Image (cartoon, rainbow, N blue to C red):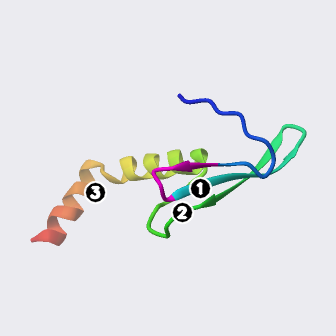
């Protein structure tokens, strides 16, 4: 993991098209702004993990049977 120090209103750039800016720092809370192309999905990690778990659960044997029936 890369660790960077940034102050309020400082940014970093990822992959030439994503800019992450520190907007505000209050106590232990940091507000982060992200400018990225619309096709780049951005999720809080806890939401991302819920989506992954939901996708995993939907791929049960019954889910696969339903998918196979749809493709027939």
Q: CA distance from mark 2 to mark 1?
A: 7 Å
Do the numbered discs 1 and 3 sit on residues whose CB atoms are within 8 Å? no
Q: Position of residue 55 (x, y in %)?
A: 39, 52
- Looking at the image, is mark 2 or mark 1 earlier in the sequence? 1
Do the numbered discs 2 and 1 sit on residues whose CB atoms are within 8 Å? yes
Residue identifier under label 3: 63
Q: Is 36 situated above or below 4?
A: below
- Looking at the image, is mark 3 or mark 2 earlier in the sequence? 2
**SS of the residue under disc 2:** loop
Q: Position of residue 51 (x, y in %)?
A: 48, 52
Residue identifier under label 2: 36
The residues colored magenta run 12-17
Do the numbered discs 3 and 2 sit on residues whose CB atoms are within 8 Å? no
- Looking at the image, is mark 1 or mark 3 earlier in the sequence? 1
**Which mark lies nearer to you, 1 or 3?**
1
Residue identifier under label 1: 19
Q: Is residue 42 visible?
A: no
Label 3 neighbourhood size at 10 Å, few (<14), some (14-19), many (20+)? few
In the image, what residue occupies the spot 78% across and 52% down?
A: 9
**Which mark lies nearer to you, 3 or 2?**
2
**SS of the residue under disc 1:** strand
**SS of the residue under disc 3:** helix
Q: Where does the C terminus fall, quadrant-wise?
A: bottom left
Left/right of residue 5 with respect to residue 40 in the rendered view:
right
Q: Nearer the viewer, residue 35 or 30?
A: 35
């Amino acid at each position: 993991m890369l660790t960077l120090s940034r102050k309020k209103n400082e940014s970093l750039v990822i992959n030439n098209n994503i800019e992450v800016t520190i907007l505000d720092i209050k106590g232990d809370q940091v507000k982060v702004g992200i400018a990225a192309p619309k096709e780049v999905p951005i999720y809080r990690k806890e939401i991302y993990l819920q989506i992954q778990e939901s996708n995993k659960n939907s791929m049960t044997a019954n889910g696969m049977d339903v998918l196979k029936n749809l493709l027939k």
